Amino acid sequence: MELSTISQPDFTALAVVIFEKEKASLPQEMYTSGIFKVDTMPANQGNTREYTEMSMEEYADNKPEGAQAERARVQQGYKKIMTSKRIAKDVGITYEMRTQNKYPEVIGALTSRPRLAINRRELDLTHRFTFCLSTTYTDKNGETVDIAMGDTFALGYTLHALKASSTTYRNRLAGNPQFSKGSLENMLKMKVENTFNPWGEKVTSMPLDVIWSSEDPNTCNTIAEYLQSTASPDALNSGVVNVYRGKFRHVVLSRLATDAAGGVDSTKAKMWGVASTQGFDAHCGIWEEPRLKAPAPGNNQEDSSTDDWDFGVRAGYGIVILSGVGFGVSDGLGTA
């Protein structure tokens, strides 16, 4: 798009026009949540990075007198390759717009474009949860994105496979209820019974510390009641201890209930889940931090024939999740 006196005549109108600047939409709830581990990629090291699970068995064995100690089992688990994706957006400003507009601060707001890249990265990260019940989804540019785990199943699934055992585990809550005390307890019970290493041994060192949800007011308020009340929200008498107070951190994902293009998807409004920032194998690799390519007179972002300036935003990143351990989800629709 070119900003010109034709496309935006009010910028150069004789009358005084009061512009209300666009409100920047920069919540980065997922990127800053701790759910995804952010890795900065060094330059000149390729556009891919392989991630793999590595586990050691949970328990030592008996050692009879004079006998050699047993060797600990070490197992490489599933692996996934992260590939860098580069995103960009340009806006052109004509010579007339730059020299004749009476509202330089508006031009300043319009050329503060890094938020476009930041918002897209946040959308892509959040959509790993939005579409977590599928192995692929189609993004806003019409490209198919592979979001399967190392075991080839969706992130939220009922029969996840382990690398070195026939044991299976689930992390999609049965019945897919909306958030409540009972559904939270069932989610925690599911975690207790379905957190394994590759040999099917129960893992206890993976505490769930995050409850995530959309920004649906009823869901958010109910979660707040259980996490912030000084007494049990269900108690008839004051002084009853709220066992959930301080146990979790609530991460509100404002882009969770959206479609691939970032529009509202009301079918995802009641979606919620849990995650372990310590044990959930989710990664975001940064090849290029969001940045603004700003033009100047005579550089290669000034068109020599039209004198237009091109402001561009660029960023590069990759996203990968290895397994569904340390994660739980309910779509909130109340169906099995």
Image (cartoon, rainbow, N blue to C red):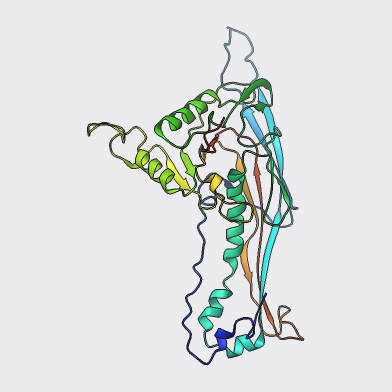
Q: Position of residue 181 (x, y in %)?
A: 40, 32
Q: Which of the 4 image quarters holds residue 44? A: bottom right
User: Where is residue 148, by image quadrant?
Assistant: top right
In the image, residue 263 above or below residue 209: below
Tell me if residue 38 can be seen.
Answer: no
Q: Is residue 119 left or right of residue 303?
A: left
Q: Is residue 204 left or right of residue 302?
A: left
Q: Nearer the viewer, residue 33 or 211?
A: 211
> Image point 46% across, 48% down: which residue?
216
**The C terminus, quarter of image:** top right
Residue drawn at (65%, 34%) of the image: 53
- Counting every numbered tag in the picture gives 0
Query: x%, y% of residue 201?
Result: 58, 21
> Which image quadrant: the N terminus?
bottom right
> For the point 51% across and 80% down, which residue is it?
105
Residue 290 vs 59, above or below: the answer is below
| Residue 120 against residue 320 in the figure, above or below | below
Where residue 8 sits in the image (x, y, percent)?
60, 81
Residue drawn at 56 percent across, 25 percent down: 194
Residue at the farthest top position: 65
Q: Is residue 245 visible?
A: yes
Farthest-out residue, bottom: 14
Up/down of 304 relative to 249, above or below: below
Instruction: Tell me residue 320's x, y (percent).
Output: 66, 44
